[in-house]
Every structure is written in structure tokens, then in C-alpha cells.
Image (cartoon, coloured by chain):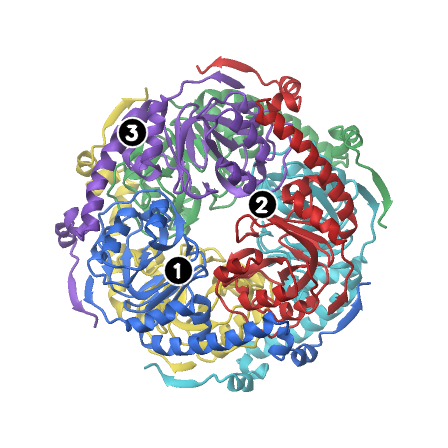
Chain colours: A blue, B purple, C red, D yellow, E green, F cyan
Amino acid sequence: VVVRNIRRPESIVMQGLAGAGVATIHEAMGRTGLLDPAVTARQHGLTIAGPAVTVLCQAGDNLMIHAAVEQCRPGDVLVVSTTSRSTDGMFGELLATSLRSRGVAGLVIDAGVRDLRELRELGFGVWSRAISAQGTVKATAGSVNVPVICAGRLVQPGDAVVADDDGVVVVPREQAPAALADANARLAKENDKRRELAGGVLGLDLYGLRPLLDQLGVVYLEEQP
Amino acid sequence: VVVRNIRRPESIVMQGLAGAGVATIHEAMGRTGLLDPAVTARQHGLTIAGPAVTVLCQAGDNLMIHAAVEQCRPGDVLVVSTTSRSTDGMFGELLATSLRSRGVAGLVIDAGVRDLRELRELGFGVWSRAISAQGTVKATAGSVNVPVICAGRLVQPGDAVVADDDGVVVVPREQAPAALADANARLAKENDKRRELAGGVLGLDLYGLRPLLDQLGVVYLEEQP
Amino acid sequence: VVVRNIRRPESIVMQGLAGAGVATIHEAMGRTGLLDPAVTARQHGLTIAGPAVTVLCQAGDNLMIHAAVEQCRPGDVLVVSTTSRSTDGMFGELLATSLRSRGVAGLVIDAGVRDLRELRELGFGVWSRAISAQGTVKATAGSVNVPVICAGRLVQPGDAVVADDDGVVVVPREQAPAALADANARLAKENDKRRELAGGVLGLDLYGLRPLLDQLGVVYLEEQP
Amino acid sequence: VVVRNIRRPESIVMQGLAGAGVATIHEAMGRTGLLDPAVTARQHGLTIAGPAVTVLCQAGDNLMIHAAVEQCRPGDVLVVSTTSRSTDGMFGELLATSLRSRGVAGLVIDAGVRDLRELRELGFGVWSRAISAQGTVKATAGSVNVPVICAGRLVQPGDAVVADDDGVVVVPREQAPAALADANARLAKENDKRRELAGGVLGLDLYGLRPLLDQLGVVYLEEQP
Amino acid sequence: VVVRNIRRPESIVMQGLAGAGVATIHEAMGRTGLLDPAVTARQHGLTIAGPAVTVLCQAGDNLMIHAAVEQCRPGDVLVVSTTSRSTDGMFGELLATSLRSRGVAGLVIDAGVRDLRELRELGFGVWSRAISAQGTVKATAGSVNVPVICAGRLVQPGDAVVADDDGVVVVPREQAPAALADANARLAKENDKRRELAGGVLGLDLYGLRPLLDQLGVVYLEEQP
Amino acid sequence: VVVRNIRRPESIVMQGLAGAGVATIHEAMGRTGLLDPAVTARQHGLTIAGPAVTVLCQAGDNLMIHAAVEQCRPGDVLVVSTTSRSTDGMFGELLATSLRSRGVAGLVIDAGVRDLRELRELGFGVWSRAISAQGTVKATAGSVNVPVICAGRLVQPGDAVVADDDGVVVVPREQAPAALADANARLAKENDKRRELAGGVLGLDLYGLRPLLDQLGVVYLEEQP
């Protein structure tokens, strides 16, 4: 099946999440939502955030990615999973060009990508399990905008997907505004902490960890034997 | 054994293959010839293409790489395999300097390399299974310019080897001109497609995939339940 | 336990080791001391060398890294290991900011790191097994400045740790001056060799390998059959 | 949270699924539902089928498995996942003894197990990602009988879990009777096929594949060149 | 293509090779011919040896295995490779039943198998990269009895394939009689050595290694410091 | 170097440790000492315990194992590590025969073994990282009875090594009696617990975990929504 109309978080929320970054949002969500770190950034220094358009493909077959392009709106993130594990290069420059023309922010794929140089030149963000030129066919049915498991996490269509150099985190659509609020609160606190730590205050004191060390029985010795 | 005289594809063909890139050539060859993606580019944005000078070494021993240097001509690509799996750093800056002075284009090795910074500064292209400073010895016999299996593919001396950010593809020597012709035809078609896709035409329409989706029973739903 | 006062190599020795680089020092030490190449550089072109401040943490718990910060002096390298294997992101920008304010050179960790972009912007060198935003707790006792096994090598507090694009090597504290002397002798010889190789002299001749090939029974054939 | 009352498939359905086995059920469900093959049988020749009691634990912490034991009924299968990847031995003989006394059929865990010999002697079936004696703590909250992702598949509490030497398949609760019916139909057909194949009929003829080979352009050569 | 008539080694040679086992034959061939150890025995204590009927399949597609069955004769070993890496379960009980009826000795496959229990009950030997119930299709052309790369080694149709608990070794057809003769000579010598070693003679003396240790500078210390 | 005389724990202690098993000893030592679970049992149901005779080899070279045999006494366990990572089959039936004649209990090796069937028939226990028939040479110096890192743990000659189906644990020689006493105390308690759990008492009550769950905020819901 292909589902045409999905609900998306407000774009102002997505912009906020992009500003917060993956690690902070993951903390703000109680340390949940992170994809397996094997799906990793294929460029440096890029952060994207957008609603997930999900795709479930047969391994080695990218037909449904083509079907998914039509369902994408500006700012969306394409999230691709396969029915069995594969590293084949299911996505390359032509698909990226097509997604670019629709304003899509980037791709998260639990498989391989190719045309890496061209993708980097396009500035199209890609997070993948592998890099492989191995070609694929267009022959088997799959689904667009159904819930998928991608790199060990459930992604519902319209969930907020945030990706940067640290990996990919998925925020359930309804939780996105609350996650953003919590992330922003964390960012504010982190700014304070960063200033103090940069000034030489120790984390042991800033976080009040000395009593904990004491209670855990950690002892200080003056010298190595 | 060391074989001194190998037949090489014409250099005009090699230049053409470098222009086409790994993914296109792999497609042009009917999706064959790709090395295992575990052997990966150790720099960004570099494409090389040249005739293979093949080397079979004992794991942890780079003696035969030294023997192979002498057999290299300008434009060649050194392709190194080992008798058992190893990630030791069999290749570094001094060997690269020597190959450079003979005009060698780069190295494909199913093992480890070291002196990575110096190799990048030299602009000497390297595709390897690992990065490791682990040193090796020069003690055991092997072969130069015999057929080798490198990263799961058969490479004959004089085969055309093309490598870029997507990995490495090997083209049997006799097939190189035909592969280039087919690759160039693909590139021309891809240019047309790229223009159309960039203009907003969907792959579903460009490739005529809608009847296939229909025939496979893919149905469109207006909304998530 | 936390050990406060450790003996460190002289800083002039550390500077020399940084100049020699990982591969040369590893050779100078008789091909010993290299950490498993799975712990890899998370930036390009950076070399650090400094005395190890060692940390042993519970997997998924970075409490003891905070305790270790206090024990660090300018030029030190933090070396973190865990009691069982984990890829969680135990280290990020705030800890790096704190270490930076104390003049610490960088981090070697047999686990994951996060805030990769910020770490790169700070110029804080990181060598790790993984990149992961997965958060950790601060709850369990461990040790600082005790001997640890990190990526398959024993690291004693105060050992010289050198890290660059090729990986990480550890030099026992007492051996550091001798390793430096040997490394410098190698560098001098390598400069000569590099000049000769760049001028077209073959390694076969430079290293006198032709008799060895002969003795091993390597024969030269004029042509492929 | 711990959810006390979950709906389970009828036990007659579970018995039928156990008889069909993992590969047949996976086919009957349109080739879906299979867990990642990295979670593998830790004994030979055992098949179990039962409703899932799901557990979500912190990595390295088995507190919630203890909470889950109380929610188990005879015939259930415990399905354990963790918030981040770990191979620690979260489950051993004492937990198995406790589950045994409640009639639990076995364990599927995306982590490690220990006391392997004792588990085999008990005849308690275990499918795990790893074998490790590494101990764990009982300190962190998690959940019982919530939806979990285990080895790349969504498992809802009460789903039918079937495991044998080939791995683990999960059947959504409502689909269990239909999957059983389809699996039984397949088994009947497979019996016929097995008899024919054992008698020397070729799959090419039994499945009518010769026209397909012809249409795909597969040609027969009489001899190797 | 499907090649119908291949040349096979004499069956008396195959029986001899089965008696020698993988490790001895690998030594007899100058330590060559071993498949990557990731392709491993899926049963205990079984040794097979037979001429290779080779199959090249698309990943996730077992159509050509069906075509290969027809080309098998009693004593053959089926050797299956795929065009890109996959762990899907391409082979199971029905295919084994069919091969059994033709007297085939076993299967070596650089992919996954399923119906493991049934295969073991049949006594049909299987060496595979993975165990997985993941189903495959029958849709894409490939080849039978062409040279294939399987687990990193070239296998020609009719080569002698020997497999036991230690893995799989391939002996080029023409070399099979010589390899057997050398293997038998080794076996005879090993019997002598085994008797001596069992009687308490040290390998140091039996192989005359003491002078080598001396020459390498190995010194004996009476006690740990 | 080869160190001839090492101090060993008393054999009565070793017998006790064998009775306790790996998981219990690891707990008794405060969850330390476990080797990486990648080094795994190559037979079922065997437990060994003995003083370590340690060996450090060059990868792909088993010369020093021969030197080590001479240093072994009845009940010892050979512990082999290599200078760089390798899966080659460095150990087989002939070495096992030799060790058997000296009463050695078994082998722990961070590399590969071969002749697996013969080792099982001999009843010689083996724990290894890999199974591989790949042959090795006898050419390079190494050490016997020096401290080695094996699978991520420091092993000193004479340390107590215990191995069973769960893996391998190393107990520093001086700690062996205390570890045994603690392990035996644990075994006694576990017997009591096993009886209670087998009788239906819940771990939640036996370990008094209900208040902890309460304090952590775990709530019970009567039914799935």
C-alpha cells in the first residue's frame, strides 16, 4: 500500500529540533528513539530534521522509493527499510535529484547508497548502513507511509526524524513539541554548564558528584605503588 | 612467480572509464565486477582507473609489493591480496613514494594501510579493508601478475580497475572497450533523466513504473487509519 | 580507587613522539604497543602525544570520567576502558570543554563518543570504537589511574600515548626516551630512503631484496601464458 | 510500566504453530515477521511456540526480567530487548528455574545468556544474540508487556512467537489463526512435493520453471569450453 | 548459461580426499584453496568430498539452484555463490530431498540455509555463511557450471571440494590426484609424529626447532622476576 | 624469552574453581576477569580449570606454542595470544596430542584452531576466536610465560584460568583461594535460591525487589489499552 496523506509535525517544531541536535533530543526523550549507530552520516557537519515519509522495500529492489518520491513534501525526510538485511546501493544521485526538486531534506536508509561524491556535491544529506555501488532492480511491491522498523527503531509516517554527525533519532509525532521544549531547556542549561566548565569548574562539583563517589566507596590514593 | 609483460587496455579507454565512475560501469557490465564494499576509499572525491598489476602476498608480509613496483608502468593500479585474511598495515608512505615516481595511479588492497595522512597529502589514492599501523615483514615468496581474488572478485593482470568514493569495480581487459561504450551511452541517458528529474518529473512517470505498481497490486489509501 | 599522583614522561619526549607519529614509533618499539585498529581517529590530520590518565568505567556509565578530569594536567591524554563491551556515547562536548580548560590533548576510548561536530570544532582529538548519541548514567564506581586494558593493550597511568590518523600506540613510560631515540633514527633513515625512492630507485635495490627473492625461488616469466 | 493482563492466542493455535516451524510460518505470512538471524538457537532440535510476554530492560540490567516472571503463564515465551545494544549475560539458570516453575516455554533475548550447560540440562529453550558470563545489575526501571523492537522486529505482548533451529518468527496475535491455517495448507503441499522430489522429480518440472528459464534467456551448453 | 557436461575427478580420488580431511589437503596444496572460515559446518563430524557443480544466483533468489539440481550426479557437491552479499535462507529441506534422490553429497553456500533440523535428520551436509529462515524468490537468471568466487576462492565446475568440521577446501580438478598423493604422504608422516608426540617426545625435538629458537635469540629464564 | 619456573595455585584450589564454573567465579570476583565472549567453547559440556602457561606468538606462526609445550605440567591450561589479530588455525590435533601426553587440561587461544573433530574425539577442551584450517609457519620468535593480553584481559603466567560453555575467566594467582571461597559461598546460596525459585517463589520476593520497583516509579496497569 501507499498512504497519501500523513499528518506531519509543524515545521516550526522541526526547525527547533534541527537546532537542538540528535544527542540533546535523545536525552530530552529520556534516552530513547536512537537508531542503531551502524546507520551513520555519510557527510560531515550537516543536520536535518523533518517528518518521516517511510518506505518498506524488498532487499535489492528500490521500486517503492520511486513510489515514495511522489508522496514527499518540502522538508520531509525519506526513511527506507528492507524486508531482509542488505547493503546493496539502493539509492543514488538520480533519486536525490528528484527528491531535491521536491524540497526533501535527506535520506535515512538501513541499506547501502551510491554516487557518494555526487550526493555530497548536491548537499543532499544521507545516513546509511553501507556505501555500495551494487545495483538493484525495480520489480517487487512494498509499502509507503506504513510503520517500519529502521535500524532497530519503530518509525511511524510523520514522526520527526533528526539526523546529524552523531546519528539519527526519531521522535513520535505527538511528542515532538514536548521533546523540543525539553531539548531547549536542556540547551539553556548546557550553555551555563559549558561556560562554567570552560572556566575550570569541575564536573565533580558542578554536578555534585563527590558525595556519590564517597558513598560508592571510591578512595583516593596519593601515589602509585 | 613474477610475470613481466602483461597486456593492458588502451589508455584512452582507461580515461573514459575514470570519467564514467564505478556505479555506472558496474551497471554497464550487467551489475557485475564490484569488489566487496568492505574495501573502501580512504580519501574523498578521487577517481582512478588503470590496468591492474596484481600481487599475492602472505598475510603480514609485503615483500612481493616491492617486487611488484618494478613491474608497474605509468597509469597502473596496484591490486594486492593475501593468502589469509589480515588487517595489518602492509602499505605506507615509502611504497607510495616509490609508486608515485613510476606514475602509478593508486592502490586497491584487501588488507590494511598506514601513513594515512601522508598518503592523503601525496594525493595517492588508496582503497583498503582497514587502516592499521601494524608493521609487516619482508620474508615470504608470493606472486606478481597472476590472477588473484581480491575482496571477493577475480582480478586478472591487465584488467581495468576503476575506483572512486563508491568502491572498486574490475572490468576484464577484453570487455573494457565495450563496457566504456555502454557506460557512455548510460551517462548520456542519465544526463537527460537528471534534467527531467531536476525539473520535477517523477521517476514513476519517467521510467513508466505506474503500470507495474498496479500489476503488483499496490493500492493507494488516502489517509492513515 | 583514584590515584592522584602519577609519574609522567618529560614533555620534551612527548613532543618528539608526536613528531614521529604512530607507525614509526610502533616500528621503533619492535612492532608492539598498537591498539586494536577498531579504535579509530574521528577527525583527519591530527596527531597528539601525552601521558595517559587511565579510566576504568562500567559500560554505559561515565561517572569515573568526571573523577578523572580532576587528575588531568596540561598535555595529558585520557584513556578510557569499560568493564564490558559497549558502544554507548560516554563522552561529548561538555566533558571535552572541561578537559580543554585543563589543557588535555585528547581522548582514546574503547567505547562511543557523541557531539562529534562540536568536538571537531573544538579541535579536541578523539579516537573511539564507535560514534553514538546513546546517553549514559553516572551511577557506578570504577577507577582512575590504574592499569587498564584498552582495545587489547595494557595501558599504565603515565605511559606515553601517541595517536594520529593511523590509530593509537602506547609506549611504556620508562621506554619512552629510548623509543623516541629509535624513532628519530628511523625518521632520518626514512628521509634518505624517501629521497631515493622518489628519485626512482627501487625498494628491491634499496633494501637489497633481490637475493632474497632468488633464494625463495621466485622466478620471472616474460609473459602471461 | 508493567501491564498485567494481556490477550493471548488460543493454545490450540500455538500448538499448531509449533508443529509448522519457523520457515513455514514465515512463508505463510508472506515472508514477514522473522527476527534478525543474529539471534540464534542455543540448543539443537527444540521448537517452541507461545504468546510473548515482552520486557524492555536497560542494557546490563535485568531487574525487569524479574518483574516479568510474575506476569508469565504456562506456555508463554519471554521476549527481552534492551534500550541500547549489549551482549552481557542478563539471563541464567536461576531465572530459568523460576520460569520453568511457571510453565514458561523459553526465552528470546536480544542480548547475552549464561549458565548455558545448565539451561541445556533443564531443557529450557533459549534464543540469544550472545553467550556471555558477564554479570548484570538490578537497578533501573523498564517495562513489561509493552510493544518492543527485538532483533529488528516489532513484538506486541500476546503476539505468537515461534522459535526453532532456524531462528525466531513473530506472528501478530490476530493473524495467528490465519497464519496457522495457511501454514498447514503449505505443510500438506510440502508433503506432496517432498514425496515427488524424493522420487526423483525435478523442481524445474514440479514448479514449472523451465518456461521461466527460457524466457529469462538461460541457455544450455553441452560442454565447458 | 547452464553447462551440462563437466569433467570430474575420478571418484577413487574423491574418496581419498575425504579420508585426508580439509586441514591436511590444504597443507598438501601449499596452504592454498581454503574458503573463508565464515562459511562453516552446520553439523558435527561429517566429511564430504566431491566434484563441484557451481551455481551463481542473484541474492535472495534460488531459481538457479533448481536448474543446477538437474546437472548433479551421485557424489557431487553443490557450490552456490551470489552476485551480492546476502544471508537469506536460499536452501532448505525440499531442495535437499531432491539432491539426496540424485546422490548429491552436500552443499557449500556463501549465503543462508534453513530447515536446519530437517537437514541434520537427513544427514545432508551443509556448509553456509548463515542460518536464516528468510524466504527467497525464483525470478532471476544466473548460471550453472561456470567459474564462481565462493567465500573468497575461485571454484571451477568439476574442481574437487572437500568439507569437514574445519571448513571447506577446493582442489583444482587437474591437481586432485597430486594433492591426494601428497596428502597421503603427510598422513603417513603424521601417524608417526602422533605416536611419538603421544609418547612424550617434544615437538621442539621432533621438528628440530631448538636451533631455530637459539638463532632467533630466544633465551630461557629460570624464574619470573 | 621463555620463563621456565612459574608459581601456580594449589591444585585443590583449581579443582574447586572448576566445580564453581565461569559465571559464578566472575561474580565472586566482583564481575571482573571475563575474556571477550568472541573466544568461545568449541565443544559442549566441558569445564576446565588450571594455571595459565602463557604464549605470545606472531600472527600466523605457532613456533612458540611448541616451545611452550615443554613448560607445561599436568593440569595446566595453555593461553595463546598473537601480536596482531589473526584467525589462522595455529593449533591442531598433533599439538593437542603432545599436550595430552603432558596432562594439559586445555587451550584458550585468541586465534583459530583446526582438526576440530579430532580435538573433540580426544576430549581436549578448546576455546578459540575462530575455526580455520589455514596453516601457519614456525619462523618467528615470541615469548612463553610472560604477561599477555588475551581477548581483552591480562593473563599472568600461573593465573587460574577457568573455562566452560559460558566462556573463559581469569583469576589472578594470589586471588584464587579467596575467589574460590567466595564462589563456594555463592554456590551454597544459589542452591537455596534454586530450591525456592523451583518451588514457585518469585525473584521479586526472594531478592526483595518490590520496593525498588516502587521507588523507581514502575506502575502496574491492569490491561493493555
Residue depicted at x 68% and y 58%? C75
Q: Which amino acid does label 2 sit on?
A: Asp
To the question of a shared chain for discs 1 and 2, the answer is no
Q: Residue F66, how many percent across, how many down? A: 73, 37
Is C80 or F208 nearer to us in this picture?
C80
Q: Residues under labels 2 and 3: Cα distance? A: 37 Å
Is D146 or D94 nearer to us in this picture?
D146
Residue depicted at x 76% and y 33%? E204
Q: What residue type is labelled 1?
A: Ala
Q: Is mark 2 on a helix, strand or loop?
A: loop
Q: Can residue E145 be seen in this view?
A: no
Q: Residues under labels 1 and 2: Cα distance? A: 29 Å
To the question of a shared chain for discs 3 and 1, the answer is no
Instruction: Residue C43: give its label.
Output: none
Examine the image and state in which quarter residue A50 appears: bottom left
Residue beneath label 3, please?
B179
Q: Which amino acid does label 3 sit on?
A: Ala
**In the rendered image, which quarter contains the C terminus of chain A?**
bottom right
- Above-or-below relation of A90 to E169: below
Q: Is residue B149 visible?
A: yes
Residue beneath label 1, please?
A151
Residue beneath label 2, please?
C166
- Above-or-below relation of A147 to B184: below
- Whether residue E173 sits left or right of residue B15 in the image: it is right
Residue depicted at x 58% and y 35%? B93
- Whether residue A166 sits left or right of residue A196 in the image: it is left
- Whether residue B137 sits left or right of residue A66 in the image: it is right
Q: Is mark 3 on a helix, strand or loop?
A: helix
